[in-house]
Amino acid sequence: MTTTLRRFFKAASIIGVAIFAMAACANASTINYTTNAPNTQFVSGGSGLSVGSISGVGATITFTPNTTSGANVPSNINFGDFLLVCPGCITGGSSVFGAFTFDLVISDTTDGATGMFVGMSPGGTVTGTSSTVQVNWQSPLVIGPGGTGAITGNFGHTHFDMVSPVTLIVAPNSGTPPGDSTVNGQVGSDIVPEPATFALIGGALMGLGLLRRKKSVRP
């Protein structure tokens, strides 16, 4: 075997080990984020983290932010929960909510950036077993990478996606706990390759190195 080929096989084995290590790092990459910023709030039709009904029996919709979370990249994540409470609806009454607007601020503490999703609702009617209230998330439904949708800082290669353009506010007797509606999202990166792809490439290169060693020990 020529010196050039020996060097090639040696390099292939080393690169293979390095790529396996990169795959492990890619799989373990995490982003820390929160939706508990002060500007996460109802900006019309309500106040702070709660909005009340405008007629019928008394009812409230309250948002509970995701206070601290570390998520693998990529993965599904939870931006927080809307909780509809209407005791009078459970006993046969109904309640009406007016239109409201809600700002959901994403704080990417890993990259040091913040961005905002804006949700608008025309309101609707709630009974014990039904709800016509929904939050319609406005475009863009992606925050990041870079300065896309950023209020402060730069998201780098990280992006946060709103999974659905609509969050349905479930009836007071639905969900877990009852009346709970989760705002689902995703976090990803534009530079994180699939670990499985890394592993395949690394395995092939390491195989070349092992093949070279096997041949070199033959009599």
Image (cartoon, rainbow, N blue to C red):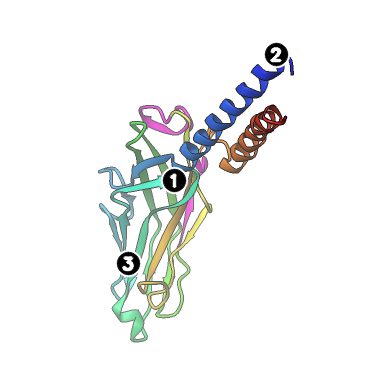
Residue in view at x 45 percent, y 71 percent: 131
Residue in view at x 29 percent, y 43 percent: 39
Name the spot of residue 56 as percent of width and height, x first: 33, 75
Front tag of 1 and 2: 2
Q: Secondary structure at mark 2?
A: helix
Name the spot of residue 73 as percent of width and height, x first: 47, 42
Residue in view at x 33 percent, y 55 percent: 45
Instruction: Work out whether 97 lies above or below 1.
Output: below
State the residue in front, 102 or 107.
107
| Mark before the other along the chain sequence, 1 or 2 | 2
Which residue position holds label 1? 72
Q: Quadrant of residue 61?
A: bottom left
For residue 12, side relative to residue 43 (left or right): right
Q: Determine the CA span between mark 3 and mark 1.
A: 38 Å
Which residue position holds label 3? 53
For residue 179, side relative to residue 184 (left or right): left
| Mark before the other along the chain sequence, 3 or 1 | 3
Instruction: Work out whether 38 lies above or below 113.
Output: below
Instruction: Work out whether 51 lies above or below 115.
Output: below
Task: Tell me whether circle 2 and circle 3 mark residues in contact (CB < 8 Å).
Answer: no
Front tag of 2 and 3: 2
Which residue position holds label 2? 4
Q: Secondary structure at mark 3?
A: loop
State the residue in front, 217 or 16.
217
Residue in view at x 50 percent, y 34 percent: 21
Q: Determine the CA span between mark 2 and mark 3.
A: 78 Å
Dot 1: within a 10 Å radius of its alpha carbon, few (fewer than 14), some, or many (20 or more) residues?
Answer: some
Q: Which image quadrant: the C terminus?
A: top right
Q: Determine the CA span between mark 1 and mark 2.
A: 41 Å
Name the spot of residue 130 as percent of width and height, x first: 46, 76
Q: Which residues are magenta?
A: 134-155
Q: Based on the picture, tell me whether residue 113 belongs to the magenta stretch.
A: no
